[in-house]
Amino acid sequence: MPQNVAGRLKIGLSACFQHADPARSLFTNKTLQYVEQSIAHWLMSAGAMVVMVPCPTGETARGDTKLAHYAEWLDGVVMHGGADVWPGSYGEVPMREAWIGDRIRDLYDLALVEAFEQAGKPIFGVCRGLQLINVAFGGTLFQDIETQHPNALRHRDPVSYDQNFHDIVLVEDTHLSRMYPGVQHARVNSIHHQGIKDLAPGFEVEAWSYPDRVPEAIRRVSGRAGRGYIAATQWHPEFHRAGSTISTVDDTAILNDFLGACTAARVQPHRPHRSAPGKIRDRAARMLRQALLRR
């Protein structure tokens, strides 16, 4: 990637939220928006300039900056991990209070995906990001894999956290499998208890967990006008460490694939046809998302 500032890719990173909490000693009762350090450094490792895309609404909102402005200015966006997706975002009632997720962040994330989709810019999701993208385009989730999926692996261990691993199987003849020629089985980190139940229309599964078959990587099917780059992994590629005693999927190909799509979109963005919108999840929350997009 060119080292001069003008030539570097500008990549947006979705914000995580810590909502106002009167019991918090630091930034008491203030809403915090932040990014996790390693995913920013992952993107920066290839020379990209990383910009957190803050939510433009809230009790302190000022000015007229919109998510659409960020989508027009930036070259692509990464939707990263964090809180559960609220089951109401895909038409379900939370089975347990602990799985209620973050509805406010869902509204922001859905609006952010919509903004970059309408701008024709590449979108990549990690962990929650994969789940959010699936929901945004009409899919559903297991609220808890161990509860709802027979014979499921343990996909999240709160003690071992990012040192919890399982195998995946790459789906033959997919874009991801061509990025890893000769690889059928691989090992990935696993830090989630929710996952894809029904895949969004227009997407394909590129990797499954093994042996319990939970989708671990998805990609929007290309080849039709207006269908820009959208891909996601359930694991965290940014947590890969070369030379580790536990061999996991090398993140380099995944990062280069996304940034390559961002470079290509600089030249020719994949603008969706207005007559065939991106089919972003459209429920009663639509009006609130419009406030985020256009204010």
Image: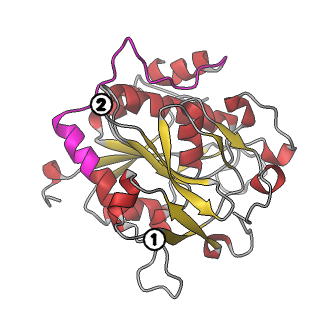
Q: Which residues are magenta?
A: 260-284
Marking on residue 91: none
In the foreground, 255 or 205? 205
Is 266 contained in the magenta span? yes
Horizontal side, residue 68 vs residue 22: left or right: left
Residue 164 lies, with reference to residue 10, above or below; the image says: below
> Residue 131: image x %, image y %?
59, 44
Q: Residue sitting at 64 percent across and 56 percent down?
A: 213
Residue 270 lies, with reference to residue 25, above or below; the image says: above
> Residue 218: image x %, image y %?
49, 47
Q: Residue sitting at 79 percent across and 61 percent down?
A: 151
In the foreground, 58 or 154? 154
> Residue 144: image x %, image y %?
77, 50
**How dense is the environment of label 1, judged by Cα within 10 Å: few (below 14), some, or many (20 and up)?**
many
**Magenta span: chief secondary structure:** loop
Reading the image, the residue beneath label 2 is: 72
Tally the marks: 2
Q: Which quadrant of the structure image shows residue 284?
A: top right
Q: Which quadrant of the structure image shows residue 262?
A: top left
Reading the image, the residue beneath label 1 is: 249
In the foreground, 223 or 283? 223
In what quadrant of the picture does the N terminus appear?
bottom left
Say what amino acid the circle numbered 1 marks: Val
Residue 234 lies, with reference to residue 230, above or below; the image says: below
